[in-house]
Image (cartoon, rainbow, N blue to C red):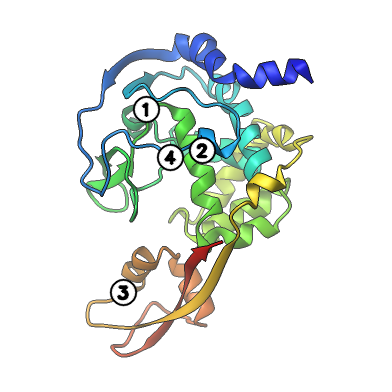
Amino acid sequence: MIKRLVFISILGILLLGCKAKKRTVSSDSSKQESTLGGNKNTQMDYESTGLYPLPADTGKFQRFSIGSVEEYIDTFSEIAQYEMKAYGIPASITLAQGLLESGFGKGDLAVRTNNHFGIKCHKGWQGDYDFHDDDEKGECFRKYNHPMYSYRDHSEFLSKRARYSFLFNYSSTDYKRWAKGLRQAGYATDHRYPQKLIYLIEKHKLYKFDKGVQLNDAIANSEPKIYENSVHVVQKGDTLYSLSRRYFISVDEIKRINNMNSNNLAIGQKITVKTELSKK
């Protein structure tokens, strides 16, 4: 027990000192002021959650260079397991998404922003950001001073949004259902997204990181959510895609809950959208 407590308490230091040291090639102060409602370098209050310690936010961007898939897994597998313990998201899924979305840690977006999960700014984001071409040109993506903040934000992002709530009814070791569910919920537009995640998990045996992780229900379920279905009346110019962006719900989910077989909308049509009301 003593050994475990000591290990947890110095986890951030070890990653910064041993692993991160050999991968960090440069650091620079972020000079962008956020126009999304907050100050630059604003990060969530991670330490108050009672989870493992993250590196102190020095206000400086730490640039990482990952040499291989194996090095990426070695660097972040333990972090993925701690996130699984706290939030119930399979470590294998987190790692596979990190590998895929970050281009194995070498992608332009990941290198420039330490954003390993392709999470866009979205309404309410108060941290740093950068722009990157994705579904549209010059989209806003979240920027972190250290990749570990990206891992925590990924857990928060999935656990606190209505459209992903059904995933947490799945077993935390059923990576195949999670992979398919993420696509269903609209995490990615790529129709082969589940197959790509499953391929990475099985090729690199990422499922082994799901085994033996004891979930911390007190933390994962500390803020239960209340949901309600609301109705949007279609206006001129509305599309399923624009509604999905407005209400943070996938196109597939809108079609499912409205029993729609096509993407066509009519002015005045009532569309049910699932929205998150509040947290207790």
Q: Quadrant of residue 207?
A: top right
Residue 278 disc label? none
Number of marks in picture: 4
Q: Are marks 1 and 2 in contact (CB under 8 Å)?
A: no
Inter-mark Cα distance, 3 to 1: 36 Å
Q: Which of the two labelled residues, at mark 1 and mark 2, occupies the earlier sequence position?
A: 1
Q: Is residue 211 above or below residue 181?
A: above
Say what amino acid the circle numbered 1 marks. Answer: Asn
Instruction: Compare residues 78 and 188 and report the one nearer the observer.
Output: 78
State the CA–CA distance, disc 4 to disc 1. 12 Å
Identify the residue under disc 3. Answer: 239
Q: Amino acid at mark 2?
A: Arg
Which of the marked residues, 3 or 1, is nearer the chain's N terminus? 1
Kindly identify the residue that appears in the image at 40 percent across and 14 percent down. 24
Residue 99 screen position, x and y as percent: 51, 34
- Which numbered disc flags the more N-terminal residue, 4 or 1? 4
Q: Which residue is mark 1?
A: 145
Of badges 2 and 4, nearer the viewer stands 4
Q: CA distance from mark 2 to mark 4?
A: 9 Å
Residue at 62% across, 20% down: 9
Name the front one of labels 4 and 1.
4
The residue pinned by badge 2 equals 152
Residue type at mark 3 is Thr
Q: Nearer the viewer, mark 4 or mark 3?
A: 4
Mark 2 closeness class: few <14, some 14–19, many ≥20 residues within 10 Å:
many
Near mark 4 (Cα within 10 A), the count class, few <14, some 14-19 or many ≥20, is some
Q: Which is more N-terminal, label 3 or label 4?
A: 4
